[in-house]
Image (tube, rainbow, N blue to C red):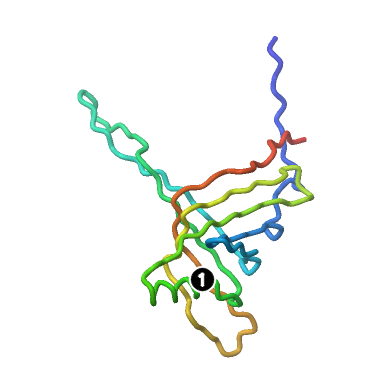
Amino acid sequence: MAEEAKMGIMSGNDAVYGGTAECHISIGNRRYNFMSMTEFESKWEVQIKDVPILGKIGMGHKAAGGKGTWSGKAHYNQSVFRKMAEEYQKKGTLPYFEMQVINEDPTSKAGRQTIVHYGCLCDSFTLAKFQAGEEILDEELSGTFESWDLEQEFNELTGN
């Protein structure tokens, strides 16, 4: 008789707490600890092309490229991206940068995951803002990236 696999159940403690992440941005020779970020998400969208196939009613599909996008929110207390916007406005050059995101929660057995995004650009910039009565100002950030590396991956969880 074949042995049945035991169903593993994840421990709630192994969920990764988002507030323990790190974000670093490298522009040229300068590396910033971008601790102002409060939210971040990057996505890699695979471009799928339709493939007509003779003798078949339905379409086939083939992966044919990809596109990286990122978005986030930060406290409005740094000028790194505004300096990029100013350089673009005055010189016509928009600097590419790298963005490293590390997720690690010391209470989780998942361990640490590190992803580096290369060829990043911002697609819009908040230049100045205020809001009477608000105690904390933040700003939306977004852009694209050309490639990425999974430098360190989470541990495979075995469950209970």
**x 70%, y 19%: residue:** 4
Q: How many labels does the image show?
A: 1
Closest to the observer, 51 or 112: 112
Q: How many C-alpha atoms fall within 10 Å of the one at disc 1: few (<14), some, or many (≥20)?
A: some
Q: Percent from the top left, x then y, of residue 79?
A: 55, 76
Q: SS class of the residue under badge 1?
A: helix
Q: Percent from the top left, x then y, of residue 85?
A: 44, 73
Q: Which residue lies furthest to the left in this view?
A: 54
User: Would you say 49 lies left or right of 125 here?
Assistant: left
Q: Which residue lies furthest to the top in this view?
A: 1
Q: Percent from the top left, x then y, of residue 62?
A: 34, 34
Q: Percent from the top left, x then y, of residue 66?
A: 40, 45
Q: What residue is shown with label 1?
A: 81
User: Based on the displayed image, in which of its 4 quarters is residue 153 positioned?
Assistant: top right
State the quadrant of the N terminus: top right
User: Based on the displayed image, in which of its 4 quarters is residue 99 positioned?
Assistant: bottom right
State the quadrant of the C terminus: top right
Q: Give above or below for 65 relative to 101.
A: above
**x 69%, y 60%: residue:** 19
Q: Which residue lies furthest to the front in this view?
A: 29
User: Would you say 105 lies left or right of 40 here?
Assistant: right
**x 24%, y 28%: residue:** 53
Closest to the observer, 153 or 31: 31
**x 64%, y 84%: residue:** 135
Disc 1 marks a residue whose amino acid type is Phe
